[in-house]
Image (cartoon, rainbow, N blue to C red):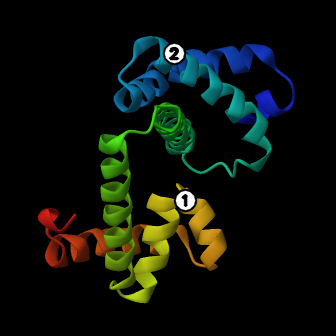
Amino acid sequence: MIKKIKAGNTQALRILIERYKNHVFRITMSVVHNEKDAEDLAQETFIKMMDALSTYQSQGFKTWISRIALHKAIDYKRKLQRKKEELSTFEEDNQWSDNNNVEKEIATKEVRQRVKESIASMPYKLQLVVHYYYLEDCSYKEIADKLAIEESNVKMRLYRARKWMKTHWKEEDF
């Protein structure tokens, strides 16, 4: 069926989309928890699938399309989170500065400094992935490219970093 789609057969494309649309929707819905957004992301997944079909290597189509859907949904959630953070930063910047805001600013700066110091106390290999993933909001692939390592190594280092943080950090320190 993939060969037919690559050859331009639109009927084969319709059949493929019909076959996988519920599966893709369930994946996006499990991440975004909003039906409208999940539908939009499912459509974007199939658009991305068409763009990337030339790179498909005929190994596990369902896994391949699932990965595309998952990454689309995760990227969408990250963008939403960034917008919320930008909006809250904008609102904070536009508030009148009174003693209470000055105290909050100082406290926030102190917490940020403690977090940076705590990250610096981590083993170096873990510091880099934590920095890129949490502070620069990079994807596994982007981190792997920056560090010239495999994505699986990035995932393992993040797992180890979280484990290390649970062992060595206390919430009240922040």
Residue 52 at what x, y percent from top left? Answer: 74, 41
Judging by the rendered image, the residue that carries numbered circle 2 is 39
Residue 1 in view (yes/no) = no
Q: How crowded is the residue under tag 2: few (<14 C-alpha within 10 Å), some, or many (20+)?
A: some
Residue 34 position by quadrant: top left
Q: What SS does tag 2 mark?
A: helix
Residue 156 at what x, y percent from top left? Answer: 38, 72
Residue at position x 46%, y 75% from top? 153
For discs 2 and 1, the disc positioned in front in the rendered view: 1
The three-letter amino acid code for the residue at tag 1 is Glu
Q: Which comes sooner in the sequence, label 2 or label 1?
A: 2
63 relative to 145 in the view: left or right: left
The three-letter amino acid code for the residue at tag 2 is Glu
Residue at position x 44%, y 39% from top? 97
Residue 173 at what x, y percent from top left? Answer: 17, 68
Judging by the rendered image, the residue that carries numbered circle 1 is 136
Q: What SS does tag 1 mark?
A: loop
Q: Residue furthest front?
A: 99
Residue 14 position by quadrant: top right
Q: Quadrant of the N terminus?
A: top right
Residue 81 at what x, y percent from top left? Answer: 46, 37
User: In the picture shown, does residue 101 fall above or below 141?
Assistant: above
Residue 33 in view (yes/no) = yes
- Dot 2 and dot 1 residues touching (CB under 8 Å): no
Q: Toward the viewer: 80 or 71?
A: 80
Q: Quadrant of the C terminus?
A: bottom left
Residue at position x 48%, y 27% from top? 24
Residue at position x 74%, y 40% from top? 53
Q: How crowded is the residue under tag 1: few (<14 C-alpha within 10 Å), some, or many (20+)?
A: few
Q: CA distance from mark 2 to mark 1?
A: 28 Å
164 relative to 96 in the view: left or right: left
